[in-house]
Image (cartoon, rainbow, N blue to C red):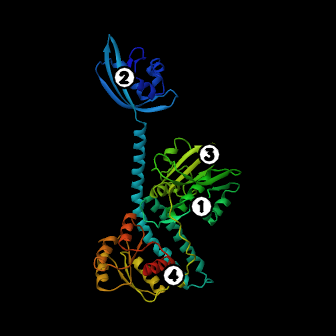
Amino acid sequence: MNKEMQGGRVVHANIQAATTLGYSLDEFLALSMNEITQGESADSLLLFNDAHNGGSAHSSISSFKRKDGTSMPVEQYISSFKYADIYCNFVFFQDISKRLEMEARLHRSMKMETIGMMAGGVAHDLNNILSGIVSYPELVLMKLPKESKIYGHVETIRQSGIKAANIVADLLTVARGAAATIKNINLNALIQEYVSSPEFKQLEVSHQGVTLELHLAPDLDNVSCSPTHISKSIMNLVTNAFEVTKAGQSIVLSTFISEHPPKTLKSGRYVVISVEDTGGGIPEDFLPHIFEPFYTKKTMGKSGTGLGLTIVWNSAQDHGGGVFAENVGGGSRFSFYLPATTQTAPQSEGEIQVSALHGSGEKILVIDDELQQRNVARHMLEILGYQGTFVSSGESGIERALTEKFDLILIDMIMAPGIGGRETYEKIIAKRKNQRAIIVSGFADDIEVKTMMALGVSQFVKKPYSLKDLAVAINKGLTS
């Protein structure tokens, strides 16, 4: 498009320039550049007008104004020339909205990945430390009469450790790619379980007058997911809605099937959880950052950790889905998409008692680089009736496993210095093909865990673990 420098009017343009900005060609030719340009665009053209420097060229990222008044980011190329004693500009521009959107999305993903890498390392170390705070009090309480004056104190220590472990579990979700137990499950069942939980009851007490309406689709497809992560996501979405909704108003939680997901998701059939509130909506400048860690207007420490919606976003990504926020009516709506599956959900195993899971002297090799972890495992294995052998490295574990016969091996995934859990197990089964093993780790990469499962590992136990967690895993590991 050409622009006369003195009058500022458009003297020629192609049809694409006009339609890109929402005009007909005749409408566009009746405009001045001041009506089209804004901000940096107008400034750059003014520089050319002042310079009268024929033949010069300039390029910049700027913005043009559409016919409807909205702003369109553009990359513009301007060359100045003189024609019939009149200085003119030739302006070529292209809409870069999609490019900027992709760059912003890439930037967010890189930032999340960086935070995730840090979170994974921190979570691994913290879980090792927390094992002593969670496991030892449990062992003490087993021998301590409930009427003891210190029983309550020890139980408080254990509960505090469990709460800290739950926060670390949130960090692991932020880390993304962390190993998790996957099951086929119906989301309606997870929602019903949550609204019957003590956590939801406490939420209702804290926000009296706010009601939750359930609109759950019958015959909902199952999803293949980590129930722990998806339950946490449901809780975070509902909690977020309660915190912005006033007394006398309601929140709608619904489930439905979508065969036309947002364009950023792969085509297919999805199960959707929708949480809609009437809390006034989300500021437009806040929406692009709503899922970023610690990007919150809430009071830190009083309304959670600042990771709530980040956990939701990461959970959706890890399961091949997505979560989307938008303003609707007088509030906001969060839509959580998970790929549907035709596989059926397994029946509940029911409550399992530790007393029914005692061993008969089976020999178990524990490979862990942390002394505290080996000691915790030593005490628990004695209580459960197993014979334990304990080594501090993968190399030592290989040597013992190839010179002695063990019914089961408990392997830590991340050990330093020396080789990790996967390489340790690969070298053991190279000589003992049918060696049973389970993974016990504070943090494990999902790909590494899947690789070990394919090699023959049957169970994954996350640190810090309880006596029951270990008992169940060993029982399944020995019988798999």
Q: Earlier in the sequence, mark 2 or mark 3?
A: 2
Q: Secondary structure at mark 2?
A: helix
Query: What residue type is disc 1 on?
Result: Asn
Q: Name the secondary structure under disc 3.
A: strand
**Residue 195: percent from left, percent from top:** 63, 62
Question: Circle 4 sits on which residue?
Answer: 139
Q: Residue at x 67, y 59 (%)?
A: 204
Packing grade of label 3 (10 A; few <14, some 14-19, many >=20) is: some
Answer with mark 3 or mark 1, whichever residue precedes in sequence. 1
Q: Which residue is mark 3?
A: 331
Q: Residue under label 2, please give it.
A: 47
Total marks shown come to 4
Pinpoint residue 353: horizontal percent, then vertical percent.
56, 81
Q: Check disc 2 and give the amino acid type.
A: Leu
* Separation (CA) of disc 4 from disc 2: 78 Å
Q: Which numbered circle lies on residue 188?
A: 1
Sequence order check, earlier mark of 1 and 2:
2
Question: Residue placed at 46% from the left, 24% from the top?
Answer: 36
Q: Nearer the viewer, mark 2 or mark 3?
A: 3
Disc 1 element? helix
**Which image quadrant for residue 16?**
top left
Work out whether mark 4 precedes mark 2 in sequence or the reverse, and give the earlier one: 2
Which label lies toward us, 3 or 1? 1
Measure the alpha-carbon separation of dots 1 and 2: 62 Å
Inter-mark Cα distance, 1 to 4: 37 Å
